[in-house]
Each structure stands twice: as structure tokens, then as C-alpha cells.
Image: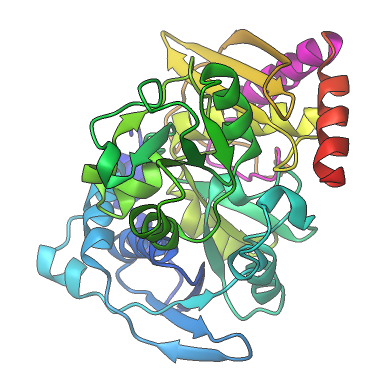
Amino acid sequence: MSGNGNATATVEENSPKMRVIRVGTRKSQLARIQTDSVVATLKALYPGLQFEISEFSGKEWKLMGSPVSQEGRKQHFWLCLQLKPVPLPRESLLAAPSSKVAMSTTGDKILDTALSKIGEKSLFTKELEHALERNEVDLVVHSLKDLPTVLPPGFTIGAICKRENPHDAVVFHPKFVGKTLETLPEKSVVGTSSLRRAAQLQRKFPHLEFRSIRGNLNTRLRKLDEQQEFSAIILATAGLQRMGWHNRVGQILHPEECMYAVGQGALGVEVRAKDQDILDMVGVLHDPETLLRCIAERAFLRHLEGGCSVPVAVHTAMKDGQLYLTGGVWSLDGSDSIQDTMQATIHVPAQHEDGPEDDPQLVGITARNIPRGPQLAAQNLGISLANLLLSKGAKNILDIARQLNDAH
């Protein structure tokens, strides 16, 4: 990340004095790793602060002191490299105490129903937002793709961290290692919890069958390996990488095979919209390129009024001052689709150029330390592409997909 050296050099002197920062997260191994990486980075940037992490058992909060995981440490050093933080001894970074609020969300608890049929817009975020509202936590780390494009009043995404590989990956049953989706036997069953993935892949690989599979990453991999129902499952590459399971990636799906979900691969830090101290603290984590790409993606999804109950997918890229956004909508069986690409000239700004102090949110995101112009250009790009697809009949495809999904 460029342009943030001077600002990070003054982070420590401008940080709140000895405040205890309470962090919330979902109760899953991946969520803990993601939260650990963000907390460790913040601890390095603000060594005078204490980060308190508690666990939610379903009925009450339990304060716990949990060391940063090994994978979380790796993520932390990688993030620190991007942020160029105030230099600190390696030993002090690894030993930094932390604690967090970890809880099971609606999406974690309801495991016998496809995500698209549960009917909640905030499947993996609502309970954590309640903790923010009750002032039980100060910030929550999410996978950005789980955060709806319209947040409840009083909340905002205060930081979007540098994106990891946003593409989907195929993990194969041990007996099919070395295969690809194209070379799997006829009628092989592939597991995915996503309508987006199923619609695109049914169209591309009609010889395969796609079935819903639920559970966290550990559970889905166990179902794949120990049962004979699935020949392969589709997961986010970023999640597998963060878990340290690079060796399980059998195939990475490129955009022409399967475009990814809005925000996939990026982490979002949700905070109370009026908590200026916390907003200032986490704002240093914004990665400008990731921010602009995700603003365009979220604006596209929001204008289409899409969500997990309809197949919508995107692909973005920054090249030579141009932001390219490809978006598409599909029928549930993948037989009908509309896709297109648009681009806009957008300068990727240095992170800590001063912007207006009264900037409102854009698609649920607050980034006061990023100039307003590029953010608006990214949002307008997403809206323009959505309007283009709507003019070509996207609304009809999405309406039918919703009706069919609700009926089954």
C-alpha cells in the first residue's frame, strides 16, 4: 500500500489513551483467524491499547484471553508489511495479549437449510451487530461478502482490508485428486451452498450435478472426505488460504468459468457509525484499491437489489488507471444469463490523503481518509453497469429466480 508512511508514523501518538477495545467475531476457526490477523495488526499500530476478546456461549459473554493463532500471526505480518506500521520488536508483536467476542450467528446455527432459503439478509452478521448496538463490543471483523449492501441504521464498515484471492476453488474427494470439473465423471455430485456458483457452473459443466452443502469449512471438508456423496465441493480460495489449506486447492476457477461474489476475499471491519475514535483507529486499515473495487461491486449489487437468494456475480480489476467491472445475473439453472463489462478512469489514491470530514457512507462504507472523488466514481460505475443489465432484462431473470427459489 502506498502513501501511508507519514500517517502511520503518528498513529501511536494520536491513539486513544489506554482504552480497552472489545472485538467481536463469529465462533468459527476461520472467523477467529481473520479476527486475529486484524487485531494483531491494530495492536502493532496502537501498542498502547488493550484489545479484549470474549466468547459468546449462546446465552452469555465469557471473557477469554486467547493468543493469536499461528495463521493469524502470518496474516498479521503480511498486513503490517502492507501498512508500514511503527517498527516494533517481533517478540512484542507475537506476545501481544488479545481477547474477543466470538459467537454463533443465524447462518452458523441453521445448517439443514440452504442459505438462499433462510430468508435473512444478515445471516452471519445480525447477532454481532446486536452486540455492537448494546455497546458490548467496539468493532467486528467480517468476511465482506457476508455484509449486506444496506447496513442497519447506526452501523458502518470502517475499514476494508487488502483483498486476498477472490476466486472460487474446487476441492476434490481424495479419489478424484488430479481431476478438474471438466474431467469429473458424468453425474458426479459437486457441493456448494451458493446459488451463484451453482448457476454458473451448471451452465459451464452440464455433465455435473450440484447439491447444497452447509457447515463451516471444517465441516464441509469432513463431509467431502468421509462421505461418498460428493465428488468435489466449491469453496472460496481466500478462506482455504487463511486456514493454511493450500494443498487442498485442486482447481481455481477463473472468471470465464465462475465469477465471484461481491466483496469475496476481503475483510470488513464493522463499527458504530458515530464512534469517531474507533472509526479513526480502524480507518488506517483501508486498502485503497480493494476499497474502490468493493464499492463498485457493492453498488452494482445494491442497484440490482440482489442478495444470496439470486445468482449475481462480479469480477473487478484495476489496470493503468482504469477500474474494470464485469457483472452478471443468471437464472437458477444457469440457462439464462446477462453479463457485461464497463470501465471508468479512477486514480487509486494514497491512503492518508485528507478527505471531507462529513462524508456520508457509500454502500455502507465510511472511508474519510480516502478522497471522495474516486469513491464516487467507483459507486457510479457499479450503478451504471447495473442499469445496463437492467435495460437488457436482468430484472426479469432475477424476479423469476427469486420466485423459484422461494417456491422450492
In the picture, which quadrant includes the N terminus?
top left
Give the overall secondary structure of the magenta segment.
helix
The residue drawn where x is 70% and y is 43% is 308
The residue drawn where x is 65% and y is 78% is 135
Residue 268 position in % (x across, y down): 53, 50
Region in magenta: 363-391
Q: Is residue 244 above or below residue 136?
A: above
Q: Quadrant of residue 299?
A: top right
Between 214 and 289, the one lying in front of the other is: 214
Answer left or right for 156 relative to 348.
Answer: right
Answer left or right for 36 relative to 387.
Answer: left
Question: Is 221 a magenta residue?
Answer: no
Q: Is residue 286 above or below residue 242?
A: above
Instruction: Kindly tell me whether residue 393 is visible in this rendering.
Output: yes
The residue drawn where x is 51% and y is 22% is 207
Residue 9 position in % (x across, y down): 29, 50
The residue drawn where x is 50% and y is 68% is 25
Q: Quadrant of residue 36?
A: bottom left
From this viewpoint, which residue is outermost toward the front?
186
Residue 332 position in % (x across, y down): 72, 30
Q: How is the image coloured?
A: rainbow
Residue 307 position in % (x across, y down): 73, 40
Question: Is 365 a magenta residue?
Answer: yes
